[in-house]
Image (spheres, rainbow, N blue to C red):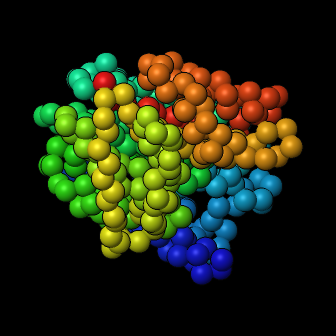
Amino acid sequence: MEAMQVNAASSVRVQMLDRRQKLQTALSTLGARLELTVLLSEVDAALDRLAVGSYGLCETCHEPIEAERLAADPLARVCLDHLTPSEQRALERDLQLAAHVQRGLLPDPSRIAAPWDIAYAYRPARIVSGDYCDLVPVESDVYFMLGDVSGKGVAAATVMAQLHAMFRALVPSRLPLADLVERASRLFCESTLPAHYATLVCGRAQPDGEVEICNAGHVPPLVARATGVTPLAAGGMPIGLFCSQRFDVERVRLAPGEMIVLCSDGVSEAEGAAGEQYGIERLGEVVRQRASTASAALVDACITCVDGWRAARTADDDVTLMVIRRR
């Protein structure tokens, strides 16, 4: 644990030094603007706190600043409890704006052409979510991604947006699926803090019903056929843990009416009244019973069942579920 903390502090220091260099370049180019000078002083102060070991501690109560907030704002100096009223209002406005931006990143299934009927549910446990959900049509194929970034809140949402941008940039290159995920993982690893990683299912659906699936440490997808519902094999390592790692691809062929169901662990690990997890077996049973319904109705039925299982317990994790059915 101590080694991980040292590595994290070292990574933050590298980021701070990089920001300092960029600010100095901006100052030399644009002149001594007040906002740039203030930012430079804040970066220098953060570097000083790193040097003496007080980085990440609230300057008022001397307790650790919330990890997700510090990840989103490495210059933070106080915890949430000690923000001024005006700072709290500004933070609330920022959160609402972040939620609005995140909703704008969600895909539109109506843009997906035949033969695919795709629907999803995306429900953040807080104002913003660390779950990742996207659909990218490229020529006659459809790439689909569903993942879960480590952590919660604003920090996870920020990393999720980064992941979204990476795949949106990489998918049109038409790399083989394993290479696509490997490239994304390497970029993700090189551009985020060591504590950040993401579980992910990435797939490519082709018009003839063949679907390639790469599972990077995520909840196993379900394949629903006329003969029953079965989970695919568990995936390997999450993306971003190591900058050089390989990923395997599994292939399935769907007949008309057959489907793949993906979910985040906010579904599979939802706890009932006795603390028992919902599990993918219960999800598979709902899919089996409602297999003849349209994708959107099936998504609604699955989410309703999870909510019923949770009963009065408040969801403490983001919930995302996607159905990809061959018409």
Relative image position of residue 82 (x, y in whole percent): 75, 43
Question: Which quarter of the image is occupied by the N terminus?
Answer: bottom right
Tell me the quarter of the picture where residue 245 sits: bottom left
Question: Whole-percent x and y of residue 51?
Answer: 57, 75
Residue displayed at 67% across by 32% down: 306
Q: Is residue 11 above or below residue 156?
A: below
Q: Nearer the viewer, residue 5 or 18?
A: 5
Residue located at (76% from left, 33% from top):
310
Residue lying at the far bottom of the rendered structure: 3
Q: Position of residue 139 (x, y in %)?
A: 13, 34
Is residue 130 shown to the viewer in this render?
no
Q: Position of residue 90 (x, y in %)?
A: 59, 30
- In the image, farthest residue toward the right: 274
Task: Tell me which corner region of the image, top left, top right, bottom left or bottom right, holds residue 301.
Answer: top right
Is residue 119 among the parts visible in the rendering? yes
Considering depth in this image, is 276 or 48 the residue closer to the camera? 276
Seen at 25% across and 43% down, the residue is 210
Q: Is residue 235 shown left or right of residue 202?
A: right
Looking at the image, residue 141 sits to the left or right of residue 221; the answer is left
